[in-house]
Structures are given as C-alpha cells and as structure tokens.
Amino acid sequence: MILLRLADRYFPPKIAYAHCDVPCGIYDPKAAQIAAETVAKMVDKIINPPELDEKSAESRRNYHNAMTRYVIEKEEQAEICKKELLILWTDFFKPEHLEVFPNLHETFWKASKLCSQNKQNVDVKAASDLVAAVDEIAEMFIKAKAASKK
C-alpha cells in the first residue's frame, strides 16, 4: 500500500474522462440532438455573420472574434455529437434492435460521417442533414427504450 502511494506521488495517474462501460442504463440522445442543433446554428451564424463596418478597427476585431468563436463552437459540438452517438450506438443498442431497425448501423454510420463533414465544411445542407439524422436516431432510441419496458 505504501509502495503504491509513493508510486502515485512520483508518477501521478492521469485522469480519464469517459462514459462508463458498465451497463448503467443511463442513456439519452438529447445531448447529441443539442450538439447537432448547435452545429446548425453556428453554420447559420457563419453564413449570416454580424454586420461589419470595414472602416472601424473595432468592428473588424469583433467580426473576426465572432467568426472564430462560431467555428470553434461548430467544431466542438460536432465532436460532442459524434461522441454521444458512439455511446448510444455501442452501449445502448443491442443486436436484437437490428430486427426492429435493420438500418441501424447505416443510420449511425451516416450520422457519424455527417459530424465529420460538418467539422470540415460550412454547409447548411450537411448541418440540416445532421440534425435530421440525429433526430431519426433519437426516435429509434425512444422506440427501443419503450419496447424494453414492456
């Protein structure tokens, strides 16, 4: 025990953040839906930016700051969406769900690809498609969860 404490003192363990792989049963698509909607909102803000007064240095700084923040948030939310989808796909859905949702894997795969596409581009259609794909997965989740309570 003392040896382990000494080892921890000189070689502190790294903190890991992850959803547990214990079947806790606490799953919800809402985080993925919020993230997808945020991606779509950031795309809209990038495409329809705040007014820019070219003559004002302060206006230019504010414009560039806003655009940078929109892009960073779009990237972060697309990554959150992908992570949340992966948790649902690999931890919540089981082989028996494929009988009810034969397109389950393809739906998740396409949604994950849309997360990446939204990180790489500023595309209204890709953002809209991501929201629709995540909403479709949320519907599958609700049906699967309701069926498991019967």
Image (tube, rainbow, N blue to C red):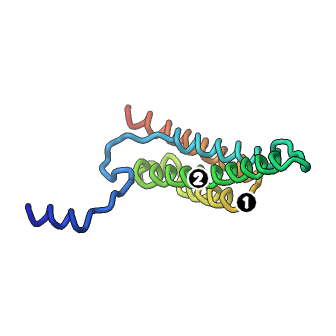
Tell me the residue that label 1 is attached to.
121
Amino acid at the residue labelled 2: Glu
Q: In this image, 132 relative to 50: left or right?
A: left
Q: Callout 2: helix, strand or loop?
A: helix
Q: Quadrant of the C terminus?
A: top left
Q: Looking at the image, is 117 positioned above or below residue 133? A: below
Q: Quadrant of residue 139?
A: top right
Q: Looking at the picture, how far across and down is residue 87, in whole percent?
A: 45, 51
Estimate the spatial distance between the alpha carbons at disc 1 and disc 2, rounded to whole Å: 13 Å
Query: Which residue occupies 64% across, 43% down?
Result: 38
Residue positioned most to the front: 57
- Disc 1 and disc 2 in contact, CB within 8 angstroms: no
Q: Looking at the picture, how far across and down is residue 126, in whole percent?
A: 72, 53
Query: Which residue occupies 62% across, 45% down?
Result: 36
Tell me the residue that label 2 is attached to.
76
Query: Which residue occupies 50% across, 36% down?
Result: 142
Judge the density around disc 2: few (<14), some (14-19), many (≥20) Cα neighbours within 10 Å. some
- State which tag comes first along the sequence, 1 or 2: 2
